[in-house]
Image (cartoon, coloured by chain):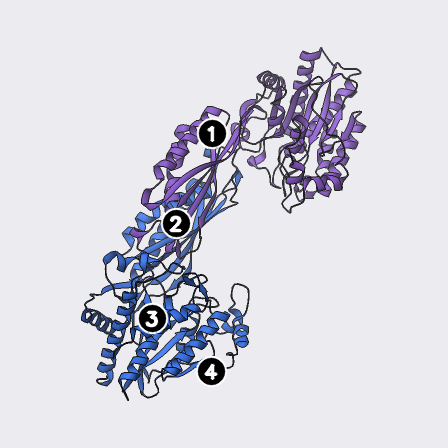
Chain colours: A blue, B purple
Amino acid sequence: VKLDHGRLLADLRRLAEFGRLGTGVDRPCFSPQDRAAREWLLERMTAAGLDARIDGVGNVVGQMRTAPRAVLIGSHSDTVPKGGWLDGALGVVYGLEIARAWTEADRRPPVGVDVVSFADEEATFSGMLGSRSFCDGLLEGELETATDAEGWRLRDALAELGWGERPPARLDLARHLAYLEAHIEQGPRLEAEARRIGVVTGIVGIRRIRVRFRGRSDHAGTTPMQLRKDAGAALIEFCHDLPLRLERAGSADSVWNLGRIAIEPGVANVVPGFAEVLIEYRDLSTSVLDRIGAEIRAATVAADGRAGVTADATESLALPPAEMDPAIGELIERAARGRDAPAMRMPSGAGHDAMVLSRHLPAGMLFIPSIGGRSHDVAEDSHEADILLGADVLADAALSLAAREGGAVG
Amino acid sequence: VKLDHGRLLADLRRLAEFGRLGTGVDRPCFSPQDRAAREWLLERMTAAGLDARIDGVGNVVGQMRTAPRAVLIGSHSDTVPKGGWLDGALGVVYGLEIARAWTEADRRPPVGVDVVSFADEEATFSGMLGSRSFCDGLLEGELETATDAEGWRLRDALAELGWGERPPARLDLARHLAYLEAHIEQGPRLEAEARRIGVVTGIVGIRRIRVRFRGRSDHAGTTPMQLRKDAGAALIEFCHDLPLRLERAGSADSVWNLGRIAIEPGVANVVPGFAEVLIEYRDLSTSVLDRIGAEIRAATVAADGRAGVTADATESLALPPAEMDPAIGELIERAARGRDAPAMRMPSGAGHDAMVLSRHLPAGMLFIPSIGGRSHDVAEDSHEADILLGADVLADAALSLAAREGGAVG
């Protein structure tokens, strides 16, 4: 099975024309440009000999009907607003090219390749919509309650696209033996370590805790410093001391972010009576997440009542970690070694459709380096050689997987 | 000269009916309720025998035409939105009652009392509009450029009220020998020290410096902690270390406030690439203000470049301090002692019309305690006994001042 590098790059570049914005792409799910991209993908899958369709939530799914079983390969083709040209598109086009090369190399494989572009991974309406629909079905009432930023209901968007009445494509455990997803790293680690392939060990769990401080708003000119109950000052002290605590509680791979801070009333001449910080933290291990959460709560309790300011903590999000299949990880690692590119094992700090799939069947993910670690921005890019290497490694791994499960192919 | 306490309180309570909101008052300048209050004040001044009018910017000015010279007494009758019932209204009604009692007690005084309610001290359109117009004239183009929060132009507001064509009332240095303003403290110091009269030594200067931090926005899941350029973390560290520096640089009366903090993009899963804090600081002494400013700049220079984040500081406001006349301060202090209420000397941390007047003629201010230090809120209040004591002390001080300048009265 030998990939056609020229064809792969041409397809990636053609896909980037849908919603092109300078060096990037603006293709939010169910926008006219996303629809056009999905219809183009449908054509390309059909031309590759796949039995392809767009389902009731916009997933584009192509099946190699000549094979009774299949490795499912893909990702998503929607982007964040003003996003990059690779992101999920890379993994979708990898799947397309691998299926195409597979079909050309083999006549009737016992294990084939199915290809998917999931809908709305980026949460224009509802995050990981397509993969959740594919694996679990939608949440009750989701078609009515999910809207985009302008309030357009998901049901109306799908109806307008003409897809709303179609049945959803569904995961078929009798057919699908594994899910493989390639993605750009979206971070700087591979580049920093000079590695060209990342093998994802798992997708981190994400939790968020909101810590609120309540003091008293006072005139900032007439209230002496020592008579204030300054919620902003309490927040500053809390946020200053927190990182040291979290370093002790976390693992080497733990990350956290104090990404949203609000102080109220937020004017120059009033002592802040209220302040709030949203703390997000991520790790592969549930017990590490528990330790970090406990540390934040302990810091909140310690801050509560200091200098007349109360503090309380509320968890606002808890997404569990997802493990990738270790055996598939080994196959990817071996494939990378076979291409003279020793891989690096790493967690994924970002969410991916593989998170949803991995709860139902063995899943594996491969990363290629992001230049400067940039993503979700028009500046996002990867070196062409890395794009091609990633496709070859994923194809080799898929081949080994198919061979292991169904006998030799190609 | 003996004040009529019942009449004073009745007038204060009647004035609080214009825009009454529960226990407070909502009477922004040039609102229908502010207009009605100014027209009522005009009537009361006229009934008190004053030659009174509303001028071209809404100032209500009453002159005791029987006297060739006068002590000007007053404040402002507009309020902040959802404000308190006393604030500036107290000083206006003090002036009205003192002029009234003065007229009743004396036939042809060599020094009389003029009364004023300045317009828009609270900056609904443009802060201290009335006193600035009275002393200096308006800024060039101010009638066109000053608007309220809804974009209503000052010129249009005055035209609609029918006042726009009227000539402005002006300070007359041949007539006005001093300005006296009473006000609620708007802070907790008198209450904390169990003093009933404050003698204002000066009105603090106010300066503001904006410190901006620029790092790099990165994905908060995929970017390891040590590879971040977190502008939010830089701001937290800066704000944490600043108070100790400012305590060293400032005086015992210095105050500062970190009242506005913004971090961007301000979402949970993106490392802040930009952060900004607005630091306001106040002191009576220009050299202390200079020292504090230098300390903030030094802290900014020390922070600049740390952990990949740049920092810079920009001054965004610099209002000079205003000294009250020490001799008038002594008269107020003596008057308080004469009423068995030892006064406390203190700076005013808030701005007042006296700030503008003091640059042109001797000015003095008297504070009465604010319950709980509250102001600019419907909860604002003062004890009735303190309201009455303040009026008596101000009347006594005005009498001494008039006696000193023009011979005995009453």
Q: Which of B162/A207 is in front?
A: B162
Residue at mark 3 to residue at mark 2: CA–CA distance? 52 Å
Chain on which label 1 sits: B
| Side of A339 where A161 appears, left or right | right
Q: Are marks 1 and 2 in contact (CB under 8 Å)?
A: no
Chain on which label 3 sits: A
Taking the image as drawn, is residue A325 in sight? no
Of helix, strand and loop, which one carries label 3? Answer: helix
Residue lying at 45% horizontally and 61% vertically, measured from the top left: A82
Rendered position, A174 above or below A364:
below
- Residue B101 location in percent, x, y? 75, 22
Check if mark 4 and mark 1 are on a common chain: no
Residue occupied by mark 2: A300
Q: Residues within 10 Å of mark 1 (few under 14, many from 20)?
A: many
Looking at the rendered structure, the kind of residue marked 2 is Thr
The mark closer to the camera, 3 or 4, is 3
Looking at the rendered structure, the kind of residue marked 4 is Pro
Residue occupied by mark 4: A167
Q: Are marks 3 and 2 in contact (CB under 8 Å)?
A: no
Chain on which label 4 sits: A
Taking the image as drawn, is residue A84 in sight? yes
Residue at mark 3 to residue at mark 1: CA–CA distance? 65 Å
| Side of A30 where B103 appears, left or right | right
Looking at the rendered structure, the kind of residue marked 1 is Ser
Q: Which of B375/B62 is in front?
A: B62
Residue at mark 3 to residue at mark 4: CA–CA distance? 32 Å
- Residue B319 location in percent, x, y? 54, 30
| Side of A238 where B324 appears, left or right | right
Check if mark 3 and mark 2 are on a common chain: yes
Earlier sequence position, callout 3 versus callout 2? 3
Quarter of the rendering occupied by the N terminus of chain B: top right
